[in-house]
Image (cartoon, rainbow, N blue to C red):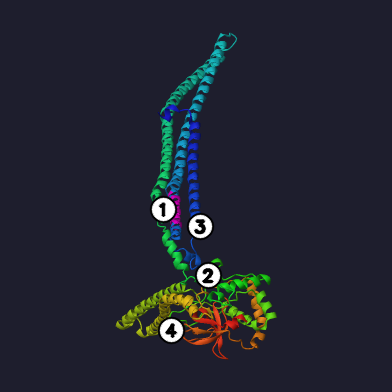
Amino acid sequence: MSWGTELWDQFDNLEKHTQWGIDILEKYIKFVKERTEIELSYAKQLRNLSKKYQPKKNSKEEEEYKYTSCKAFISNLNEMNDYAGQHEVISENMASQIIVDLARYVQELKQERKSNFHDGRKAQQHIETCWKQLESSKRRFERDCKEADRAQQYFEKMDADINVTKADVEKARQQAQIRHQMAEDSKADYSSILQKFNHEQHEYYHTHIPNIFQKIQEMEERRIVRMGESMKTYAEVDRQVIPIIGKCLDGIVKAAESIDQKNDSQLVIEAYKSGFEPPGDIEFEDYTQPMKRTVSDNSLSNSRGEGKPDLKFGGKSKGKLWPFIKKNKPPPPPPASASPSAVPNGPQSPKQQKEPLSHRFNEFMTSKPKIHCFRSLKRGLSLKLGATPEDFSNLPPEQRRKKLQQKVDELNKEIQKEMDQRDAITKMKDVYLKNPQMGDPASLDHKLAEVSQNIEKLRVETQKFEAWLAEVEGRLPARNEQARRQSGLYDSQNPPTVNNCAQDRESPDGSYTEEQSQESEMKVLATDFDDEFDDEEPLPAIGTCKALYTFEGQNEGTISVVEGETLYVIEEDKGDGWTRIRRNEDEEGYVPTSYVEVCLDKNAKDS
């Protein structure tokens, strides 16, 4: 089967067919190129998707990804990123192994096809030239033969005419002979050209054209084979990344299997555990007997009683039934020892009052003795906006312990870093001492002293936080014991008085929350009435309190107390975790309610 023998007369069709084959190859190259672009676009979209859902660094979202389910999700995103990388590999391999090679091959194919068909056209033109020569000699031979016949006939006519002279007859005979000679020469020439044409034609149809067509056939077959190999490479490029893609998918499955719901539940406990004890039972209040208020009267029961007037004055009440209200901020944590360093910076100042501004304003207009609520409100708002205490005393015990431990770990890492730097400088100084030409050892003294000073500062800072941490870790059990004592013993020992103990106030939900609009109004009114408050008379004592722990009041509006000290209560806790006390006529301020044991005077409370 050969195109040279089977398609000897299909030169034009073969030319069209080979051009179509090149067009098909170029179309396949374009297809692969578009596939690589799709793979790149897909990989880019996958990477962007993975990046979009990655947690932001140094953000709260990053801290939330400590749960196993979130870690599995992060692993899923990372594996998806690797999965996108394999699609990039597919694109790169297809571009280098298929597109580049085929593009170069197409150029070579075009050159080869052009050369082969140029040879074919050249052979075609040669045979056409031989044919034209043959036709020309044939016509000339035919013309000479006719001229010879006419000259012979003219001679015979002249020879038969008796009226023609002998000279004319001789001239006619000579002319006929010349024509016959020319005819013979044309015949010989025609015969020679015919033989040459037949030879050229035989060579053309049996040698030149078959050879050229055979080359074209081989060229076309190589094109077909090359296209098939490219298709195999196309599939092989995909197949090569399948194991890696499988590993990515296996990684996703492994990450999903690593999810531990129990561990996540434990992490939730560690993240939100406050360390407080649940409140005790609320005692029955018999209103048929003389008024007897218990510890819960100043915490849970009292808040419910105060909720009704809030509705009357348009305020929005949030009662103290802490299991059913939205959490805002927990009250200040109690210490476990009487160490002076228990709270070096002091807790935050009182928060805003639980009662709405409208209610307080009405009380202010109708009752002069209650003006002091605005003063405590002003102080609470001014300190509420302050920075977080350095010892995290504004947090519940368990959360405070975690923050302190985290701070200690960070400081230890910084110390280790500085120590490594100091060791490196010391070694460099030793090298300079042994080889003075390398540098001046004295030039490193300043840097060495600076690093040593930084280490000492960090150690002092670490010791401070370690002391706070030790106190927190040591006071948690004592805090629970104290809470139990406050819940039962004191009430039985002092039935005539009202025991306003801290445990009933400290709920896991913290203090009350107010509407933002009310908070804004309170700021304005606290400023407007500030001058009047400064001139008011000293507030009367409404009870006494005993300091359970030492508290160093370093913030504005607070007062320092010593464990065991007895002081006067001039303003009870309004739900913000602070109680206002007085030592003498000139010394008064706020202390955390959890630091004192409050006993309110019955008559003062009733009035």
Q: Residue at x 37, y 85 (%)?
A: 445
Task: Decide which of tag 4 and tag 3 comes sooner along the chain.
Answer: 3
Dominant secondary structure, magenta: helix
Determine crowd level at label 3: few under 14, some 14-19, many 20+ residues with C-alpha closer than 10 A. some
- Between 272 and 392, which is closer to the camera in this rendering? 272
Q: Amino acid at mark 1?
A: Val
Q: CA distance from mark 2 to mark 1?
A: 39 Å
**Residue 521: image x %, image y %?**
66, 75
Q: Of tags 4 and 1, which is closer to the observer? A: 4
* Number of the front mark, 1 or 3: 1
Q: Which secondary structure, mark 1?
A: helix
Task: For the residues labelled 2 and 1, say whether their Cβ atoms are less than 8 Å apart.
Answer: no
Q: Which residue carries the number 1 mark?
A: 253
Q: Mark 4 falls on what kind of element?
A: loop
Q: Are marks 4 and 1 in contact (CB under 8 Å)?
A: no
Name the quadrant of the C terminus.
bottom right
Instruction: Please state which amino acid type lies under the numbered disc 4.
Output: Ser
Amino acid tagged 2: Asp
Q: Which disc number belongs to residue 509?
A: 2
Are dots 1 and 3 in contact, CB under 8 Å?
A: no
Please say whether residue 272 is visible from this viewpoint.
yes
Query: Quarter of the image containing the N terminus?
Result: top left
Residue range of the region highlighted in magenta in the rendering: 76-93
| Cα distance in 3D space between marks 3 and 2 | 40 Å
Quadrant of the image occupied by residue 449 = bottom left
Using the rendered view, name the quadrant where residue 421 is placed. Answer: bottom left
First in sequence: mark 2 vs mark 1: 1
> Contact, CB < 8 Å: mark 2 with mark 4?
no
Residue that mark 4 sits on: 339
